[in-house]
Image (cartoon, coloured by chain):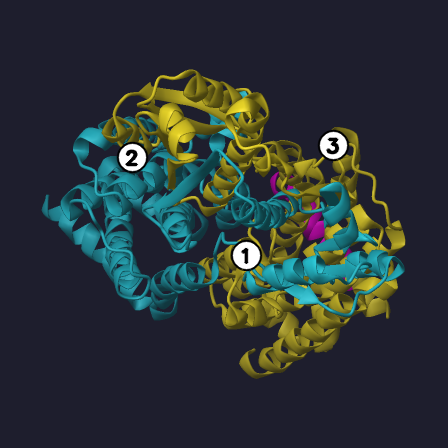
Chain colours: A cyan, B yellow
Amino acid sequence: MRQLITFIRKEFLHVFRDRKTLLMLFGLPIAQIVLFGFALSNEIKNSRIAITDYSKDAVTEQLISKIASSNYFDIQRTVQSATQLEAAFKKGDIRMAVIFPANFGNDLVHTGKATIQVIADASDPNLATTITNYITRLVNDFNTQTALAAGKPLQILPEMQFLYNPELRGAPNFVPGVMALVLMLVCTMMTSVAIVKEKELGTMEILLVSPFKPIYIIISKLTPNLLISVVNLFIILILSSVFLDLHVKGSILLLTFDSILFILTSLSIGLLLSINAKTQQAAMMGSMMGMMLPTMLLTGFLFPIENMPLALQVLSNLVPSRWYFIIVKKVMLKGLGITAVWKETLILTGMCLFLFAISLRRFKIRL
Amino acid sequence: MRTLYFLLEKEFRQIMRNKGIVRMLIIAPVIQLILLPLAADYSVKNISIAVVDNDHSTASQRLIGKITSSGYFKLTGYTGSYKTALSLVEQEKADLALQIPAHFERDLVRENSQKLYVAINAIEGTKANLGGAYLSSIITDFNEQLRVDWHTTGSATGSDAPQITVAASNWYNPYMDFHLYIVPAILVTLVTAMAAMQSAFNIVQEKESGTIEQINVTPLKKHFFILGKLIPFLVLGIIIFTLGLLVGWLFYGIVPVGSLWVLYISLVDYLFAMLGLGLLLATYSATQMQAMSLSFFFINIFNMMSGAFTAVDSMPDWARAIVQTFPPSHFIRIMRMVVLKGSGVGDILYDLGAMALIGLVLNGWAILNYRKTV
């Protein structure tokens, strides 16, 4: 036991001695959370659109001022004709064009019908769908108003209420996601270097010929990383509470427990990579280049998992951050208790034990 | 010039000698580019809805039928109590809950107006936005149908109220194929991670193993050394990019509408800027671990903020100003414009210029800093 403590101390000294790296390990994840928390948003507003009005009558004026007064759109006055339209789309100056055909108001009064032509730049399909929907909603509102004025019967009025995040801020979705992503990648990265570095420097041989047990080597390597990650976690939680107005609604104890479980799982992945890799470069490439994009996409905070093909849905079950993301959302944002997250907790426990057991088995005591 | 040639020969040999890394640099992007666009599908079509039907009338049944047959929603809960529905939303079993109040049909006829209550889980903003919009347009349609079917019950004048309809068309991607949008962006992020950042590791590796001192004491000029480090990764980036275009064509049927040479000119411009960043990071790092932490930081920020997966337009002004200094944001814009819309050089001058400027600043800074530290 005393041996172990001495070794853990040695590892801590290694970490603390390298001030620059330590500063990066703390500073960079925090900077990311704050930056993303403030900058990212799902709300689509200020989309640049062009309005071409060939009719110029009272109705089109009313509609245009209605469009202008919503904060969804930023009307670009420069585009006036259809020929300028394509050029503007190709330069990326506008996202959508709204065209009122000639005699719009006349048609509406005399035939009771008129059509607005809307052309969206669908190279971004979701943006196109959303802003087309906005326009349709504005026009429908306009219709409803005139209908109410005319005494149209049988009005059904949907009343929408946005739960948990009424202003549609990006932070409530992105902070748990980025927390999962950053913790997982930083933990994996730190650990992936740990053992392979000793191999590269040749000090591994010394460790192996000593009477020190392999499991102690692993534990002493993991302890400083675990501590750094837990400190990181608390800093992130405090920052998001102070700056982003995202407080932990549920039990902090439960969140901490699950976070430690998740951190341990990520450390074990790094351990496994480290044991299999021959050079630091290979270990880091595996942990960063290999894992970054898949983790980012399969965690589920950028793209809904239920939209993916079945094979990828199955694959996403193997990504620990997916489960942690669910836990953070439930415990931190919704304030639910252990009864809501026992399944995810159990899965993380299983992953952690499995990965750790494999790393231990594959740890070679011969070089 | 001969010096540079020998230096390049050495660098290429060193890179090629490490078969594992070469395999990873070539195969990993190809596999990721094949698989990941499948994961990045944001066409919202599986919105789960819980319906609280307190009315149990023909009207409420028709509305539910209309919602489930629309193709956007799947019914995951049908209860009589609003509380149960809310707890379904809480457990993420439903994205939104729709409440049809008691006597909805009767009162609609009597009072001529009724409310429906919709509660949406707004943590995922895009889904909430789209889900709410789809549902309200379905309800409007339903309303219209009711008016036509129950014509006798309504006043005759009302249905003559003028109607404005919206005829929407989608240019450049008429089938709303999300892959067309996401594949070019994923290709850019892969080129960034695989090629641009490798130059940083390569230089720091020489620092760590001490071989950089040997190079420093030779009469080799600094700029030759730097060129020797940059050119191999420029070539690697071009190879990965070409493979990526092939994968996009073979697996997703994406053929750039614009010309290829515009793409390659932009690519070289982009790699010039990103390799400059790699070089700069290398001058500031003493160990591979540090180079790794720094490049992870930058790549993660680029991935999250350059418009690949999130919308730059939705960001606050200060964030949009910062994003302008990220080379990937320009290259992703160029890729999408050239690949989907066929934009020419004239359309992308701003982005090309911005990348060139960023590249000059980063490379200049790196060379200055390099002279001081080593």
Picture quarter with the N terminus of chain A: top left
- Tags 1 and 2 on a common chain: yes
Amino acid tagged 2: Glu
Which chain does the numbered disc 2 sit on? B
| Total marks in image | 3
What crowding class fits label 2: few (fewer than 14 Cα within 10 Å), some (14-19), or many (20 or more)?
many
- According to the picture, the residue beneath numbered tag 2 turns out to be B90
- According to the picture, the residue beneath numbered tag 3 turns out to be B252
Residue most toward the front?
Answer: B156
Separation of residues labelled 1 and 2 (CA atoms):
34 Å
Which chain does the numbered disc 1 sit on? B
**B12 in the magenta segment:** yes
Separation of residues labelled 3 and 2 (CA atoms):
37 Å
Sooner in the amino-acid sequence: mark 1 or mark 2: 2
Residue most toward the left?
Answer: A2
At mark 1, the secondary structure is helix
- According to the picture, the residue beneath numbered tag 1 turns out to be B299
Is B248 situated left or right of A361 in this image? right
Amino acid tagged 3: Tyr
- Tags 3 and 2 on a common chain: yes
At mark 2, the secondary structure is helix
Q: Residue B322 occupies which quadrant of the picture?
A: bottom right
Label 1–label 2 contact, CB within 8 A: no
